[in-house]
């Protein structure tokens, strides 16, 4: 039986591959015109190939989006406290702690923000326990004459999520719950929103809004006034 082989040369001789010149193709396979503005040229060994800018940009955008969505949450880096310890820490934090956002000073970018958790106490053992369970930093506060030496535990960045998620179920006051949820929301945005290129500026601006909100919430009188206002309304 006779076998027939079609040479590669004949296969390539269709209208597209005429003269083996792919540049005769005027549109990408999704129908975008290969205009000078819409064409990426690249050297690929001995060939020079083209990419459609619209398609390539859309692809990298999708890829970045998928990468961001699958970004892992903040990992626990310290031994997990048991429920009683968490409830104790939550109660103490409610009385002595601060949830807020600060501005990071940067020469490159303005309006960089960072979530912060602070617990101050004159008993070093208390701040040491927070440090043992959630990491962060311990420091001596500036000594005020006539007052006892105070210590401070501070946690910054995405590790604040681990702490807030731990204590949130045990928090009783609306004011602290509101701030805890606000922090989780801001950190979720930081995790999933674009943090590079032009779009990063939009993300930074959105995070800055959270900082303003924290400032507003932290300024709002003392707890007694808030509770009284709540009873009035
Ligand atoms: Zn295209």
Image (spheres, helix red, strand yellow):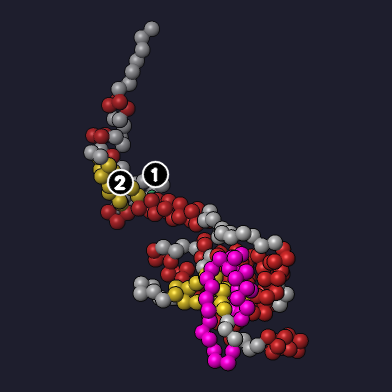
Image location of residue 126, percent across then percent down: 63, 74
Give the CA distance from mark 1 to mark 2. 12 Å
Q: Residue furthest top?
A: 1
Q: Which mark is residue 121?
A: none
Q: Does the magenta segment cover residue 119?
A: yes
Q: Is residue 23 visible?
A: no
Marks 1 and 2: which is nearer the front? Answer: 2
Asked if residue 189 lies left or right of residue 27, the reply is right
Q: Which quadrant holds the N terminus?
A: top left
Q: Which quadrant holds the C terminus?
A: bottom right
The part of the chain drawn in magenta is: 118-147
Number of dots carrying numbers? 2
For the residue pair 105 and 40, the one nearer the viewer reads as: 105
Q: Residue furthest right?
A: 231
Q: Is residue 83 above or below residue 95?
A: above
Kindly identify the residue that appears in the image at 63 percent across and 89 percent down.
221
């Amino acid at each position: 039986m006779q076998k027939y082989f079609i040479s590669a040369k004949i296969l390539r001789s269709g209208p597209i591959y005429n003269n083996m010149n792919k540049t005769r193709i005027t549109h990408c396979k999704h129908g975008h015109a290969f205009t000078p503005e819409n064409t990426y040229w690249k050297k690929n060994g001995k060939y020079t190939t083209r990419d459609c800018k619209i398609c390539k940009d859309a692809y990298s955008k999708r890829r970045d989006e998928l990468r961001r969505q699958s970004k892992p949450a903040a990992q626990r880096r310290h031994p997990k406290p048991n429920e009683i310890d968490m409830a104790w820490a939550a109660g103490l934090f409610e009385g002595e702690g601060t949830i807020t956002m600060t501005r990071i000073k940067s020469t490159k970018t303005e309006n960089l923000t960072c979530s912060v958790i602070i617990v101050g106490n004159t008993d070093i053992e208390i701040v040491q326990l927070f440090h043992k369970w959630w990491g962060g930093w311990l420091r001596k506060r500036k000594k005020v004459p006539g007052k006892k030496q105070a210590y401070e535990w501070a946690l910054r960045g995405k590790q604040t999520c681990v702490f807030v998620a731990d204590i949130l179920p045990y928090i009783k006051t609306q004011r602290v719950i509101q701030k805890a949820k606000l922090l989780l929301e801001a950190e979720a945005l930081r995790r999933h929103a674009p943090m590079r290129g032009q779009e990063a500026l939009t993300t930074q601006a959105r995070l800055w809004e959270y900082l303003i909100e924290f400032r507003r919430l932290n300024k709002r009188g003392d707890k007694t006034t808030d509770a009284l206002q709540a009873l009035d309304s």
